Amino acid sequence: MRVLVAEDERLLADAIAEWLRDDAHAVDLAHDGAAALERLTVNDYDVVVLDRDLPLVHGDEVCREIVRGGGAARVLMLTAAAEVTDRVDGLGLGADDYLTKPFAFPELAARVHALGRRCRPAAPPTLHRAGITLDPARREVFRDGRYVPLARKEFAVLAELLRAEGAVVSSEQLLEKAWDEHADPFTGAVRLTVLKLRRKLADPPVVETVKGAGYRIP
């Protein structure tokens, strides 16, 4: 998934991003509300992890703008305030979930994963196609019963191809979902990752290249 972390405490923001990247998400960072709004106009996010007390533009206003925009992004709001009224106010602004600081990183990751499922069409927790089984929660992949160890980008690309259910997924779509905003679209990163993925999945080949369009698992 593509996740925006809007948090002004830089060490905390970096820690959240590292944890989510370990879960194979593409993560962008913003350290104030203005930067968060700018990124939201450029990129399509599945989930926004949003600190309520952002500088420049308050997190409440960022949340309102996300809701007004009518996009698919789900909002997980973070705050140091633990009062019930604060949580109610945050949810009333349109946030989809609420987490008070300090929090456990596994819980935050689980909430992000749950919100990401809600922004997509309903899909089974475990993905199956062409003899491949991918379990997003356990980060495990099997092909015809054989365990396939994958790097984070390989796992993310395979997940997007399986979710497409046979449809073609373009390189641009894979960059959008599996890499962050610093990825150079001209580096050939997608092509190289698909090449490594094919080698690890082994024969018979299962990931097809559709010339001029992208990739698919038929």
Image (spheres, rainbow, N blue to C red):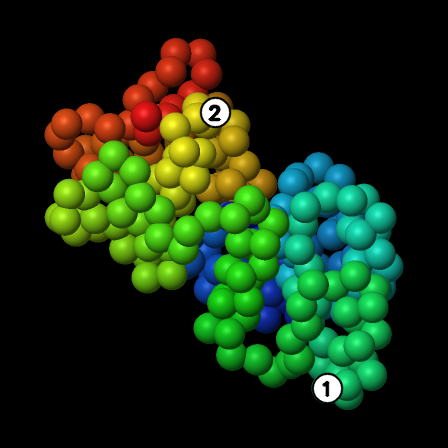
- Measured as percent of width and height from the top left, residue 95 is found at 74, 63
Can residue 16 be seen by looking at this rendering? no
Q: Which residue is mark 1?
A: 82
Is 191 left, or right, of 60 in this rendering?
left
- The quadrant the C terminus occupies is top left
Instruction: Report the disc number at residue 98.
Output: none
Classify 11 as above or below 37. Answer: below
- Measured as percent of width and height from the top left, residue 123 is found at 46, 48
The residue drawn where x is 76% and y is 78% is: 87
Is 58 left, or right, of 121 in this rendering?
right
The residue drawn where x is 64% and y is 81% is: 101
Classify 186 as above or below 128. Answer: above
Mark 1 and mark 2: Cα distance apart in space: 43 Å
Secondary structure of the residue carrying numbered label 1: loop
The residue drawn where x is 44% and y is 26% is: 167
- Measured as percent of width and height from the top left, residue 206 is found at 24, 28
For this rendering, which residue is in front, 105 or 140? 140
Q: Which residue is mark 2?
A: 170
The residue drawn where x is 58% and y is 59% is: 115
| Count of numbered circles on the image | 2
Label 1: how many Cα within 10 Å (few below 14, some 14–19, many 20+): few
